[in-house]
Each structure stands twice: as structure tokens, then as C-alpha cells.
Image: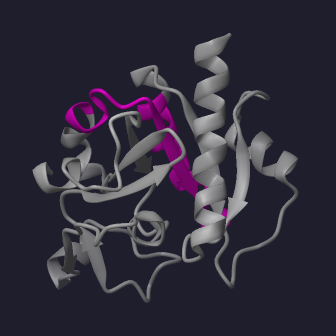
Amino acid sequence: MASALSDSRISTDHIPVKLVIAGPFGVGKTTIVDALSEIKPLNTEEVLTQAGTLVDDLTGVNRKTTTTTAIDFGRLTLPGVVLYLFGAPGQTRFQVLWKELVRGALGVLVLADTRRIDDSFAVLDLVENAGIRYAVAVNHFPDSPDYPLETVREALDLDPSTPLVVCDARDPASARASLIALVEHIRELVLS
């Protein structure tokens, strides 16, 4: 991290902001951090083992071969702000990291998958119980059903003011638009 802070692209007039990328298992958190980061991201990806299949529900993500075992980390510099991105592991057994991971974070981008929308509730509960600002990005997979955003908002029981966007976590422009929706939401809440 010391080398990231001394990077010549980050001037002293950039405000450092910690953001967390959260979501259920296999929703694309590592992928979006990889797409967004201007530095080589830190990933703690490990190969899924047979033992893991006993505790990780692979329904809907049966081609998944790796999983995050701690965090992902990336950095993105925008005009006036440098975003430090922390990707949270999606499995329930890693929720013990949650409190420490969100400490000092200004917001959370929650990724959702319309193929497994019910998997998002546990993460949304964590975010809401932490009292942290958030936006939701529906990561669109090739086999994802398309629903109108209002239908997704209703299914997730989101407040009308919570930003809800569709993204492709693999696409840097789409991923950035999701993150900007979160940052603008935070700014609106802080300035109001």
C-alpha cells in the first residue's frame, strides 16, 4: 500500500475513498475489481476444492473454478478522488471479515445476479445492518434473464432512492459507470 500512496499519479489534492465491492458467491466481485483497477489488483483467488463444494452452493455457477478466500484489492483514480476498492468474499463462512472490511468505507457496491436473486438478501442485510451507503449493480451474465430494473428493485425490496444499475463486470466502462453511480449517491447523501 505504501507504494500505491507514493504513486506519482496521485496528487495531494485527491481525496482517498475506501469502497467495498460485495455480493454473493460467484457474482463477479473479483472480475469487477480487475476491470476497474488501474494497478495490478491483489487477488486471493484459490482453486475450489471438493471439500468446498460441500459448503459452497454452485447452483447457477457450476463452471466456477476459483473463489476469493480473503479480499481483492484495486485502485482507481478519478478527478479529485482516489478510490481504494476492496472486494469481499461472498461465502457466508467469510462474514467474520465483514466488520473489519467495511471499517472506514464510505460505501458498498453490491453486485447481484438475476439468475440467483435470493442469494443477494444476506449481503444486503449485512450492508443495511452496518448502516453504510450502497448502490446495487446487476451483473449481466450471458444466460441471465432480463428483467426491468423496477422488477429487480421490487424483488430486492430496495428503497426508491437506492441506485440500481445493470453492468457487465468484465467491461471497464460498464464497471466504472456502476462505481460512479455509487460515488454520486454517496456525494448526494453527504451534501444533503
Q: Nearer the viewer, residue 17 or 97?
A: 17
Please name the predominant secondary structure of the magenta segment in the image.
helix
Which corner quadrant of the image does residue 72 belong to?
A: bottom left
What residue do we see at 43% from left, 63% from top?
Answer: 29
Q: Nearer the viewer, residue 52 or 128?
A: 128
Q: Is residue 139 visible?
A: yes
Q: Position of residue 186 (x, y in %)?
A: 58, 28
Relative height, residue 99 to residue 3 (above, below): above
Q: Quadrant of the C terminus?
A: top right
Q: Is residue 176 left or right of residue 102?
A: right
What residue do we see at 71% from left, 39% from top?
Answer: 163
Relative height, residue 152 to residue 66 (above, below): above
What residue do we see at 53% from left, 77% from top?
Answer: 60
Magenta stretch: includes residue 79: no
Q: Is residue 90 visible?
A: no
Q: Is residue 39 left or right of residue 22?
A: left
Relative height, residue 135 to residue 188 (above, below): below
Q: Position of residue 82 (x, y in %)?
A: 41, 44
Seen as rendered, the residue at the extreme top is 192
Per the rendered image, the range of residues in magenta is 99-127
Q: Position of residue 168 (x, y in %)?
A: 63, 71
Magenta stretch: includes residue 100: yes
Name the colouring of the figure.
one colour
Q: Is residue 98 left or right of residue 85?
A: left
